[in-house]
Image: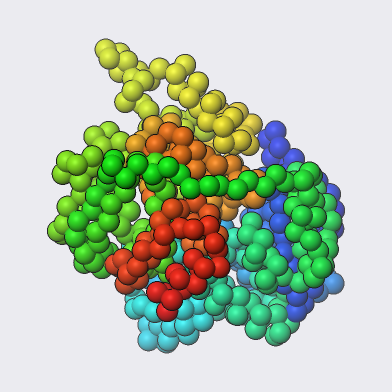
Amino acid sequence: MLELQSISKCFPGVRALDDVSLSFQSGQIHALVGENGAGKSTLLKIVTGIYQPDAGRMLFGGAPLRVHNCRDCLDCGIGLVHQEIQVVAEASVAENIMLDKLDAFSRRGRLDWLRLDDQARAAMARVGLDMDPQAPIGGLSAAHKQLVQIARVLSAEARVLLLDEPTSSLTEHEADRLFGILRQLREAGVAIVFVSHKFDEVYQIGDQVSVLRDGRHVGTRELAGLPRTELIEMMIGRQAATVSFGMTAVERTREVLRVEGLYALGRAHEVSFSLYAGEILGLYGLVGAGRTELARLLVGAEQAERGAVYIHGAKAQIGSVADSLYQYRMGYVTENRKEEGLLLDATVRTNLGITIWERIVGRFTRRIDDRAETQAAQALVAALDIRTTGLEQAVANLSGGNQQKVSLGKWLAAGCDILIVDEPTVGVDIQAKAQIHRLLWDLAAKEGKAIILISSDMPEIIRLAGRILVFKDKQIVHEVVGTGDYDAVSREIGRWLN
């Protein structure tokens, strides 16, 4: 169906793709894996006309394929779900789903809203979105926006479907629903390219896998019978070290954070819990269960209608994210790095240093101490293994995984006592994921930090969290004590989500 021949692409200082040749067949789910910066997203952007290759050509159904923009791509029958959320925030859910098809609902300059809503509802039902199609999309969670993106592409009935980390913000339940849809599309003869860092998903849904490393095609293999250790070695060029984590030494006598009866209409319903020094507390639930909504209430991004928050035993008055950071040393790594977590046009140095400007600004000159900012940024680049051409590189030009590391790094620079981390390893490869897990565990176990971990990755949350609060319908419905026994804990969580 789709063939890439000797594709190469260079950016300033980086050879993103080097003579890559791949074929994707009808009725097949073809996984594409590689570390951050290996060239996966660049390859998809070339297929869809966002980038033009420096060399090579593409064939679609045996005929030469030339696409200059996303419109050409859609007209050819190729659909892309981006890793980064791309929606029109001011428009409705229905308008976003039908964005590329609005002219089909227009007559004499007027839109047939009833027909548009009906079509949008059908697409929403396929991905499990149960809401008013005329609801504005701007206020939805990142997970809901991601489902809208998937619904948009499915509604186009594409012959080739490109999925770049489509489950990054979805729980196992939502991912399983998506996989059911993908299997139906495979049976219908659609060619599916599935990019993911989650090996469980790759083996669950894929037929073949191709590996990119440093912009080169390392090899393509059938997934059936392929050992994971061999796939990992193809991806990183060496054997991966396995790291197991024990339980952190939680100081139950040091209650760092206490939440009592927190309520906000549509966001939190009488939420109460405590967080202790040295603890990693997990929050798990389906999309829209209220985990991210709670985080935003805690850091002052939104305001509660009633309830109280106590930090180190004293009642806190948090009116903004700045209050949260500078008065209470509480940081928030947002799930939506592109829209909320980063200054994309600013440099790596600026993004990593922004949370410490209050500490390093001159008392009289009010100028930022460039040397102190540079030293802090260099230390974080090394600690997080951020792959960048230098501190002055724009964050927008980093891969998605390296952007995520910068988003996390700025809060590590601030030295927060309480760290709320929302989907910390979205779009992050296996090695970087292990690094972030180690960093979070060390912060709790060795430095006594109190961490709230929000994750849709059940193995991640079971591996790291000593306690897990299960959310449903904007409230805590159960507490699970982490034991490290994945099967037992996942079954217990599942009983409360059904």
Above or below, 111 relative to 275:
below
Residue in front for this viewpoint, 113 or 420: 420
Q: Position of residue 147 (x, y in %)?
A: 48, 70
Above or below, 332 relative to 3:
above
Q: Position of residue 237 (x, y in %)?
A: 79, 44
Q: Give left or right: position of 35 versus 124.
A: right
Q: Give left or right: position of 48 versus 469.
A: right
Above or below, 123 relative to 325:
below
Q: Residue at x 23, y 66 (%)?
A: 269
Above or below, 35 relative to 414:
below
Q: Residue at x 45, y 53 (%)?
A: 465
Residue in front for this viewpoint, 245 or 393: 245
Specify whether residue 204 is in view: yes
Give the quadrant of the N terminus.
Answer: bottom right
Q: Residue at x 39, y 79 (%)?
A: 130
In this rendering, the count of numbered labels is 0
Q: Position of residue 425 (x, y in %)?
A: 54, 51
Q: Position of residue 403 (x, y in %)?
A: 54, 43
